Image: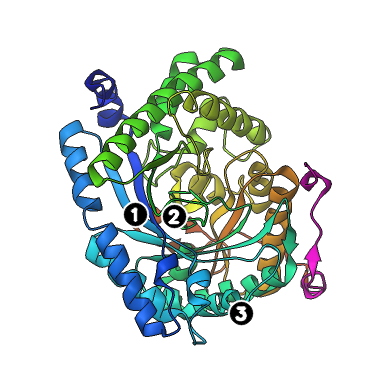
Amino acid sequence: MPNIKEVLTTLDMIDKRHLDIRTITMGISLLDCCDTDIKVCAQKIYDKITRRAENLVKVGQEIEWEFGIPIVNKRISVTPISIIGNTCDTDSYVPLAIAMDEAAKTCGVNFIGGFSALVQKGCTKGDWILMDSIPEAMKATERVCSSVNVGSTRAGINMDAVAKMGKIIKETAEITADNDGLGCAKLVVFANAVEDNPFMAGAFHGVGEPECVLNVGVSGPGVVYHALQSVKGMPFDDVAETIKKTAFQITRMGQIVGVEASKRLDVPFGIVDLSLAPTPAVGDSVARILEEMGLEVCGTHGTTAALAMLNDAVKKGGVMASSHVGGLSGAFIPVSEDEGMIAAAENGTLCLDKLEAMTCVCSVGLDMIAVPGDTSASTISAIIADEAAIGMVNSKTTAVRIIPAPGKVVGDRVEMGGLLGSAPVMPVHPESSENFIARGGRIPAPLQSLKN
């Protein structure tokens, strides 16, 4: 049993400062669901997910009631579907996405991740089919999330896949235009994707993972923001120490919940992802933490330095509180999901170029960004290439979750609701990157890849 005193110390944080467990995510291997008949494969997928995750939501709710700790989301991640579907005699994996969606509904989870492909060095037939299936899969499902890993420090960047994903994102926006391109909010393009990420839309169950595992994602920007009010005007040494102590408390709560949930579900405990994940709620913003450090508005000069210190201090404090830290573990800066980021983007202080710079020191990158609907596929591909290059050279995870909102222009707003929030449409550079993207091929891995 967890130490009840440790739980009690978090009650004030939960009650007043938006502290919560953002997600408990069950990872499930589908490697034994392969079949040449896609209907049989889809049924196997549905059966295994519903069998393994049958009690996930129930256990999460029990822990919430017993410990008084909010667990906002219960989620599932599965083996990348391009691997499973590669055995099927088919030209579309949409039936597999529908099977995932139905399983998610049966289990009562809000999202299921793993409609994914890992193409950092090249594409199999299954990878191409998966990518081609994404637009229709995002339209046909409610809870399925998709991700594609196009680069890594070891492999370089697959520019053919980058070009492809620019087109796929445009198609996904257009096919879900009735909902402001909502399908793109469930689609992310990675470099250096990790196998144990509990957060959506990028979660998938890596091939190096156990048969079944439970990973936890914690949150608490509001707690950090409140803690920093006690060190106003003090040196950054004191700021960093305060963040470290707060991150320890936040992560410790995630460790307690993860161990208890894994015991009750009879599956191994995986990791705690100690990322600071904001919500659209006032008081739960990463941007407001940076402003509390002394910035007038997030995005102004000094923002990257402030974010670097925040990210580092969160990791140093959190790693001491859990036996296994993993996932992305940093600070998220999704524009639509952070009220402070939204405000900074609306007044023009926060722009795409600044967000790209901030990517160098935080968890993922250009996350939940809305751009004009007439943004070209090649421009989106170039944005992905820039982010992938940052990840590749710096040996870190970077990602792009971008929404070319159909019919929208700069100054308009995209409404997605819930944790996805809303986003102001941000400008992109009008100059073309078409010839750059048209080259294709592979950007070679950097010298950092030669570590053996």
Viewed as shown, does residue 130 lie left or right of 47? right
Inspect the image, locate mark 2, and give the three-letter code of the amino acid beneath it.
Met
Q: Quadrant of the C terminus?
A: top right
Q: Quadrant of the N terminus?
A: top left
* Residue on which disc 1 sits: 75
Q: What secondary structure is marked by label 3? A: helix
Observer-nearest residue: 238 or 421?
Answer: 238
Inspect the image, locate mark 1, and give the three-letter code of the amino acid beneath it.
Arg
Mark nearest the camera among 3 and 2 is 3
| First in sequence: mark 2 vs mark 1 | 1
| Vertical arrangement, residue 280 with respect to residue 274, above or below | below
Graded by Cα atoms within 10 Å as few (under 14), some (14 to 19) or many (20 or more), the crowding at tag 3 reads: few
Mark nearest the camera among 3 and 1 is 3
* Residue on which disc 2 sits: 200
Q: What secondary structure is marked by label 1? A: strand
> Given contact means CB atoms under 8 Å apart, are the residues at marks 2 and 1 in contact?
yes
Viewed as shown, does residue 217 lie left or right of 159? left
| Vertical arrangement, residue 61 with respect to residue 223, above or below | below
Q: Residue 369: where, in percent of width, then height?
A: 55, 57
* Residue on which disc 3 sits: 125
